[in-house]
Amino acid sequence: MRRPVSERLVLIFLIDALGYTQAGSHAFLPEFDSARHPVRSVLGYSSAALPTLMSGLLPEEHRHLSMYRRAGRDGVFSRLDWWLRPLSGMTGRQWTLRRWAAASLRRAGVTGYFSLYEVPLSLLSRFDLSQRHDVFSPGGFGAHLGLADLVAAAGGRLWNWTVPEARAFAELGEEIDRGERPVLFLYSAELDATMHAHGPEGEATAACLASLERRMRDLLVAARRRYREVRAFAFGDHGMAEVSATHDLWSRLDRLGLSVPRDFLFFLDSTMARFWFGTDAARRAVLALLAELPYGRLLDERELRAERAWFPEADYGEAIFLLREGEILVPSFMSGQPVRGMHGYHPNDASMYTTLLSNCRDLDPPTDLAGIHALLRREIGSIGQAG
Ligand SMILES: [Zn+2]
């Protein structure tokens, strides 16, 4: 057997949508045997939760809530508008136009994760991407150092969404066999995708969890052969709810007979409807409609401040209507079709909690995402100081 070449490895698995419901009991990955507790996520989607995990900042500090915000003067889509808007009515060419638009954003230097989903092309230039820079790369938060900066500074390696997952897991295994790096960090989105498509209770989700469990266990076993000490951590950014109902708010808004974007502008996420108003009459009409709807509620300033998701400039909406757990908007700007699983509900909803799994018994259990960040910051920061 080869002698350990490194003293200590900090091994980190960020599994998108690994909820407390999925991983709260030791039935999942029992080798990570420290106590497991619910960890509170943040308001919003992975677009908000991943920046909080990677930076330790809260949504109003890192300024990400949803993938799309209202465009300011330098919105990334405004430079596409001269060709995109005239072509946006070509209903048979939507997929091609989206592909061109995405490629042109990459050429313009957008490195963050985004999808154009089914955002109406005629409205695209009214919005902007909240994540211009990849939050998994050094410099992703400007002068504020995030985990990606610390991993790089420690001589570690990180795999993000740009690497196909089979390759990422294989390369992580190769790095462990070499035994030279003190920190290895893998981000996986396959559980999130599986649960969206099949629901958190589906057989496909059980199979995905079993497959992740097997790969993570094998990597932990391999790491223990190669390093004298292995400190392993696995956690999600939020959980996942089974979808129980869908609602067509878009048609209701159309029937108000208001003009978009002159009277008002709206963005329909899967679990949130966000509004900006051009006229008082439009504001009154929309708020009256929302007040009638039983499946959601407006988040007021007090509550948004309490969630540390208050944006005084209304970047994410002058009014934010949040759906009840398990219910989604169909159609939305995300999809015209229903899905089986969704997140993006209130952080107090049971399905939204994630958890932290570890093989370390000496941890103060974190209670929220910023707590997980602080813990990892200490773990990575202690490299070089500990033998
Ligand atoms: Zn998701």
Image: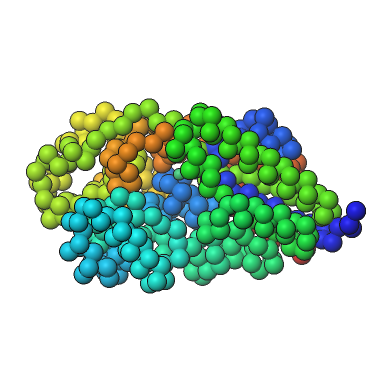
Q: Is residue 72 left or right of residue 184?
A: left
Relative vertical location of residue 198 with respect to residue 145 in this rendering, above or below: above
Q: Is residue 174 visible?
A: yes
Residue 314 coordinates in the image, percent (x, y): 29, 55
Nearer to the camera, 5 or 25:
5
Residue 368 appears in which quarter of the rendering? top right
Q: Is residue 245 left or right of residue 163?
A: left
Residue 359 coordinates in the image, percent (x, y): 74, 42
Q: Is residue 247 left or right of residue 12?
A: left
Residue 105 coordinates in the image, percent (x, y): 37, 67
Q: How many marks?
A: 0
Nearer to the camera, 297 or 295:
295
Q: Is residue 234 left or right of residue 129?
A: right
Q: Quadrant of the C terminus?
A: bottom right
Residue 248 coordinates in the image, percent (x, y): 24, 35
Nearer to the camera, 113 or 73:
113
- Residue that appears at 72% across and 58% down: 174
Relative vertical location of residue 308 with respect to residue 107 in this rendering, above or below: above
- Residue that appears at 15% across and 42% down: 254
Relative vertical location of residue 5 with respect to residue 282 in this rendering, above or below: below
Q: Quadrant of ligand 1?
A: top left
- Residue that appears at 41% across and 41% down: 344
Relative vertical location of residue 299 with respect to residue 104 in this rendering, above or below: above
- Residue that appears at 34% across and 51% down: 117
Q: Is residue 38 visible?
A: no
Nearer to the camera, 212 or 343:
212
- Coloration of the structure image: rainbow
